[in-house]
């Protein structure tokens, strides 16, 4: 059954229809984007694992504006399996917003976030569930990913190190979105009124008891990663600027550096003229210094511009996402 639903998620907790009771022990939130070739295999595997665990559960698929027949397959699965419901976005709003919508829609005591491409192994769910009985957040860390190229591997390491050094939250190298959280953690996350929300960092920032579980990603059977270089770069910038003001303070360091260089160059010029009795022919060095200073200024303008852009996004208070409709079992 397709339930018409229009959502403008402006407030803290998004106004998604949800029950106040907790009919499920575990809600499985699955963001999907053009996963038509994987969604049925994912459903079979998760159903197999959850049947063995004998828990009351639901699977909430969130379609992030897919252009293939992902939604049609979610609808078909929902008619076959009463455990399944779906949320369809009006367009692509990004993975974090899909996770946020799924968490808001979930009705379980605990929420599991997992990718729908089977790279997050469903066989790990029982282990995560066991750890969730003693911690509010059970997050996972990739131990190795042989399918990742060298550039992505080392750029990822650089991001995690920069984030942990600059931000007021820490992210362990290899941390993923594959995790189980308690209901109170979900409530804390959905109460955030930010438009540009970096969920991976937010789970670290809010506190609560947490524990880690290591895993090795499974090679994707079909298709490819939906993250290209541009999206990964935007995610990195968003993550750092959401949790740190250190980059914008670099302007003070740049100013101090410029003053030191200018002072030293002035001392050198005076020494050459009055002590060595040699005129300073400084056109080349002057151009180099000017180029250096101008480059620094442009870099700082770019950093300041990123923060101004975030202020612009927040002050407009547009919906974080818009739901076209909710898919339920008939």
Image (tube, rainbow, N blue to C red):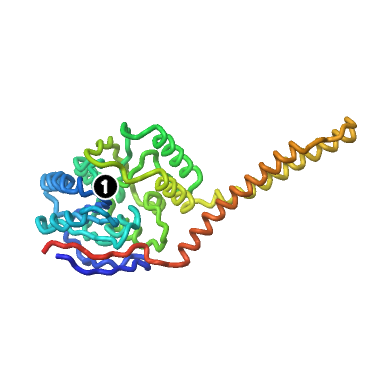
Q: Nearer the viewer, residue 1 or 101?
A: 1
Residue lying farthest to the left in this orientation: 80
Q: Is residue 133 visible?
A: no
Residue at the spot x=33%, y=52% of the render?
Answer: 95
Report helix, strand or loop for mark 1: loop
Q: Residue at x 36, y 39 (%)?
A: 174
Where is residue 98 drawn, in percent x and y? 30, 56
Q: Quadrant of the N terminus?
A: bottom left
Residue 312, horizontal then vertical, whole percent: 49, 63
Q: Residue at x 40, y 56 (%)?
A: 197
131 vs 148, left or right, is left
Categorize mark 1 by other alpha carbons within 10 Å: few (<14), some (14-19), many (20+): many
Q: Quadrant of the C terminus?
A: bottom left
For the residue pair 135 and 298, the one nearer the viewer reads as 298
Give how far across and how far down residue 264 sits, in percent: 76, 38
Q: Residue 56, image x and y in percent?
A: 14, 54
Identify the residue under disc 1: 115
Above or below, 329 against 44 in this view is below
Q: Quadrant of residue 268?
A: top right
């Amino acid at each position: 059954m397709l339930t018409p639903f229009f959502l403008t998620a402006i407030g803290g907790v998004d106004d998604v229809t949800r029950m106040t009771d907790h009919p499920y022990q575990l809600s499985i939130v699955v963001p999907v984007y053009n996963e038509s070739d994987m969604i049925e295999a994912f459903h079979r595997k998760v159903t197999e694992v959850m049947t063995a665990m004998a828990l009351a559960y639901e699977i909430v698929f969130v379609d992030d504006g897919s252009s293939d027949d992902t939604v049609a397959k979610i609808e078909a699965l929902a008619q076959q399996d009463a455990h399944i419901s779906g949320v369809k976005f009006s367009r692509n709003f990004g993975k974090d917003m899909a996770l946020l919508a799924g968490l808001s829609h979930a009705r379980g005591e605990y929420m599991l976030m997992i990718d729908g491409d089977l790279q997050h192994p469903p066989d790990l769910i029982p282990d995560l569930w066991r750890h969730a009985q003693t911690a509010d957040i059970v997050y996972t860390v990739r131990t190795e990913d042989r399918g990742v190229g060298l550039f992505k591997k080392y750029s990822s390491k650089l991001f995690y190190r920069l984030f942990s050094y600059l931000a007021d939250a820490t992210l362990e190298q290899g941390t993923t979105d594959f995790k189980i959280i308690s209901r109170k953690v979900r409530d804390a996350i959905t109460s955030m009124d930010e438009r540009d929300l970096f969920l991976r960092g937010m789970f670290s920032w809010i506190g609560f008891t947490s524990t880690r579980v290591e895993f090795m990603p499974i090679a994707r059977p079909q298709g490819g990663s939906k993250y290209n270089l541009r999206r990964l770069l935007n995610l990195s910038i968003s993550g750092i600027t959401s949790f740190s003001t250190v980059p914008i303070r670099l302007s003070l360091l740049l100013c101090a550096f410029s003053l030191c260089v200018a002072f030293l160059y002035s001392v050198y010029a005076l020494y050459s003229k009055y002590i060595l009795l040699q005129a300073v022919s400084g056109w080349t060095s002057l151009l180099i210094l000017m180029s250096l200073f101008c480059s620094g200024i442009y870099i700082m303008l770019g950093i300041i511009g990123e923060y101004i852009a975030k202020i612009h996004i927040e002050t407009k208070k547009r919906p974080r996402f818009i739901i076209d409709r909710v898919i339920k079992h008939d």
